[in-house]
Structures are given as structure tokens and as C-alpha cells.
Image (cartoon, rainbow, N blue to C red):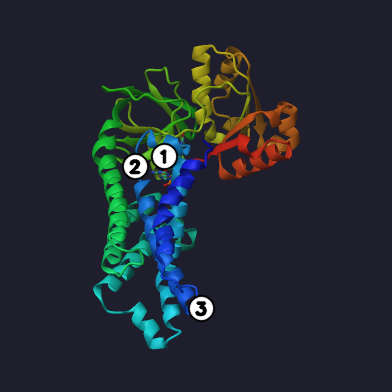
Amino acid sequence: MRKWTPHALLWAVGLLPALIGGVALPSGSFGSASTVLDALGRLAGLGGLGLMLVAAIVSFRIPGFDRLFGGLTSLWRTHHLMGGVAFLLLLGHPLLLALAASAVSLDAALEVLFAGDIATWLGWGALLVMMVFLAPSFEFFGSRDYQRWKSLHKLAGISVMLALTHAFLQASTIPEPWSTLIWAVLALAALTALAYGLLFARRASQYSYTVAEVARPANNVVELSLKPVDRQLRHRAGQFVYLTPCDSKLQAGYREEHPYTLTSSSSEQLLRVAIKDVGDASRAIQSIALGSEVQVMGPYGAFLPAHNHDAELWIAGGIGIAPFLGRARELASRGEAVNIHLIYCVQDEARALFSDELRRLSARIPGFSFAMHYFYRDGPLSSDFVRYHCPDCATRKAYVCGPARLSSLARKVLVANGMPRGHFKSEEFTLL
Ligand SMILES: Cc1cc2nc3c(=O)[nH]c(=O)nc-3n(C[C@H](O)[C@H](O)[C@H](O)COP(=O)(O)OP(=O)(O)OC[C@H]3O[C@@H](n4cnc5c(N)ncnc54)[C@H](O)[C@@H]3O)c2cc1C
């Protein structure tokens, strides 16, 4: 199955009501400019609501489910895109209907927009709430604050309910009983995903750990080793978890969940995460107390392949070394031969995290080699640098983890070296 197929299926389900609506449109719907606008307005409403419901269904974090879609970061990219398209369609819905009615008169257009009945006001309410919870996703409305974004996103439920009630009350383009059936099935799927995510998945995938060790690979990075209180989380190298510190003395981020990639091998008893200080919560956790409790939820993600049968090129930037470190530790414990070359990009030697350990690991893993790329010494990552250290890079599968700028540069460099685009996979430490 191609990696975009599951995502395409989600789009198909979201757009299904519009497709059925298109088939059910009365003949003559495309006879004049105003009937075309009217038909497009109706279809925009159906498409927008369908996509909004599917975006809601996939927004619940259910460990394992995300792997079908290439990991949570990839699934949430689709969720964000769907939410954006749904919003544009729902905004277009009343405007197109009003434009269609304006062919009769301005009063008729205003009557469409502000009919004064409950269904119309519910529709406007849904749009207004949607604007409020989507606004923090765009930098236009100020710097993106994750916690603000997350709190406001909870309003999405209200918007979905208002929009659904609007659809149930309005005369539908899709004939009954199909209209009720379609919306009821999609609404039920969203409710089931919500209930499963909150009641079952949360309990089944949440684990209690205590901080057993705090290592300091650099002055702005800690690596926490976590010991299970009872149940132990099982994971694959390269996956990530949501970590909630329960140390009430923390200056920030107390009981706030943040995603961190596991740096431990899947065979270790302790879980490890390396955390770089970039904001309030990640700065405060640098001084977390030994023995304090943390809640761990997951695992999520499908960045690295399950096995290393192919020749691979890993490119890491800064703290983006985390998934590769976990996999290298795992390979060293298995003693399996591989064909992997790692290019680790940092600004200078002082910022090269775990470089001594990587050197030791490369001596222990047959077929694993690595080169450091120092920005201040070597400049931006270039085709020549990559070809010099990895002459057969074009025939390898590439995995890149680091800042977005590094991912796009690495993609350009590798494609310029002849790597097919499908051989390139990246993970960025951002979900917004
Ligand atoms: C899949 C994934 C894996 C990650 N792995 C690591 C890792 O191994 N090591 C590491 O140091 N960092 C990792 N991060 C980044 C880490 O989650 C953020 O640095 C941390 O959440 C910042 O929180 P803050 O309050 O300190 O900073 P802020 O200043 O609040 O935020 C800094 C950035 O992190 C994002 N962010 C903040 N809170 C969250 C949250 N709860 N969920 C998602 N994004 C958030 C913000 O959008 C912003 O872009 C990972 C992120 C993702 C998405």
C-alpha cells in the first residue's frame, strides 16, 4: 500500500457527502450562473461538514492507530489540512448561496444570510466558534502558543455540534433518509473515537514512571532515565511519548504533557528521553527531582522502519539525534550487521550531543559509520559534503530528523544527488 493511500481514504470519506450531494442535485443545477453558485454553495457545505467530522475523528490520539498513517505527525498534518479546507468550504457555503440569491435581489441575498431562523444562526455560530479555535494555528494572529492553541481547540466539539444541528434542521440536498444516515454515521464515528480515546486508550496507554537518573550531555539538555512503577511501556526505536512531569516543585510545565522521542533501546528496562531547553516547560524539566513521578503516554510515531535491511542514510540536526540514538543503542545491543551512515549536523563541537557515545556505538555496530557536520566549520549542509562522506547516498533510504530548515535543505541536497523523492522521510519536532 502506498503511504498516501490511508490519507487519501480519509479525504474520500470526508468528501463523500459532497459527492452524494453532487449526484442528488436536481437537473438544471448547472443551467445558469446563479444555479451553479447555488449548487456549489450546497456542495461546499456538505464537503466542509464531512471534512470537519473526519478531522475530528482522527484528532484523538490512539497509540498504534497513527502507525497506519505513517505516524502521529503525519496524521496530524492531514488533520490540520483537512480542518483548514473544511473552514474555507464552510465559509464559502453561505457566501455562495447568498451570491446565487443576489441574482434575484439584494434582499433575497440578505434573507439567505440572515434568515432569522434557528438553523441559520446555528450555522453562523458554528463558523464563529471555528474561527476562534482555528485562529491560534496561524502566526498572523500572534506567536503560536501551544497551550493556548490546545485549550481553544477544545471548542471544536461545540462547533461540530452546532454545524451538525444546522445540517439536520436545514432542507438537505441529499434526499432522506440518506442525509440523516450519513451525518448520524459520521457523528457516531466521531463520538466513538472521542470515547475510545478518552476512556480506553488513555487508560491503556498511560504508564507511571519515576525519574531514576538525570544525565547532562550539554548545559541545556538533560537525558532522563525513567523506571517503571508497575507496567512497562513497549516501544520501537524512534517512537515518541507524551511525558507529564508530576514534580510539583517544577517552575513550569507541572502536569503538562509534552512529546519527547525515546532514546532508549526497546530492550532496555528503563525508558530514556533527551530534553533540550527551548521554552518554559522544557527549561524547568532540566531540574526535575530524582525519584519524582512522571506519566508517560504512548508510544506514537512510525519514523524509523521496523528493520534495517536497506542501506540507510541518517541525517540528524541537534536534538534531532534522539530517534537515531535510540536505534543505534538498540543495534549495538543486538550486534546485528547493518549498512547505515549517519551525518550529524550541529553548530560546533560544544553542541554535539552524545558524540562520544555515538563514536563508541559505531565501533560496536558492524556497518554503522558516522560523520560530524559543524555549521561554523563546514557551512550549510551541501551536496559535496554528503557525497564525500556517503558516495552511494542516492541509492540509500534517507531519514532526517531536525529543524524544518535542515529537512528541506537535506531533501534538496539528496534529490540533487539523484535520490528518488520517495526514499526520503523526515520527522520534525513540531505538531502545529
Ligand atoms: C514528535 C515530537 C518529538 C519530539 N521529541 C523531542 C525530543 O526528543 N527532545 C526534545 O528536546 N524535544 C522534542 N520535541 C519538542 C518538544 O516537544 C518541545 O520542545 C516542547 O514541547 C517545548 O515545550 P516548552 O513549553 O518548553 O516550549 P514552548 O516555548 O512552549 O514551545 C516551543 C515549541 O514546542 C511546541 N510545543 C510546545 N508544547 C508542545 C506540546 N505539548 N506538544 C507539541 N508541541 C509542543 C510549540 O508549538 C513550539 O513550537 C518533540 C516534538 C515532537 C512533536
Residue 214: percent from left, percent from top: 40, 25
Disc 1 element: helix
Q: Are marks 1 and 2 in contact (CB under 8 Å)?
A: yes
Q: CA distance from mark 3 to mark 1?
A: 56 Å
Q: Is residue 191 above or below residue 335?
A: below
Q: Amino acid at mark 2?
A: Gly
For marks 3 and 1 on the same chain, the one whose residue lies earlier in the sequence: 3
Q: Is mark 1 within 8 Å of ligand 1?
A: yes
The label on residue 151 is none
Which quarter is ligand 1 in?
A: top left
Mark 3 surroundings within 10 Å by alpha-carbon count, few (fewer than 14), some (14 through 19), many (20 or more): few
The label on residue 253 is 2
Residue 361: percent from left, percent from top: 56, 17
Q: Amino acid at mark 3?
A: Ala
Q: Residue at x 36, y 79 (%)?
A: 112
Compared across the picture, whether 257 is left or right of 418 comes to left
The foreground one among 342 and 82 is 82
Residue 67: percent from left, percent from top: 43, 34
Mark 1 surroundings within 10 Å by alpha-carbon count, few (fewer than 14), some (14 through 19), many (20 or more): some
For marks 1 and 2 on the same chain, the one whose residue lies earlier in the sequence: 2
- Residue assigned mark 3: 33
For marks 2 and 3 on the same chain, the one whose residue lies earlier in the sequence: 3
Q: Is residue 404 above or below residue 264?
A: below
Q: Residue at x 38, y 56 (%)?
A: 50
The foreground one among 129 and 291 is 129
The label on residue 282 is 1
Q: Amino acid at mark 1?
A: Ser
The residue lying furthest to the front in this view is: 27
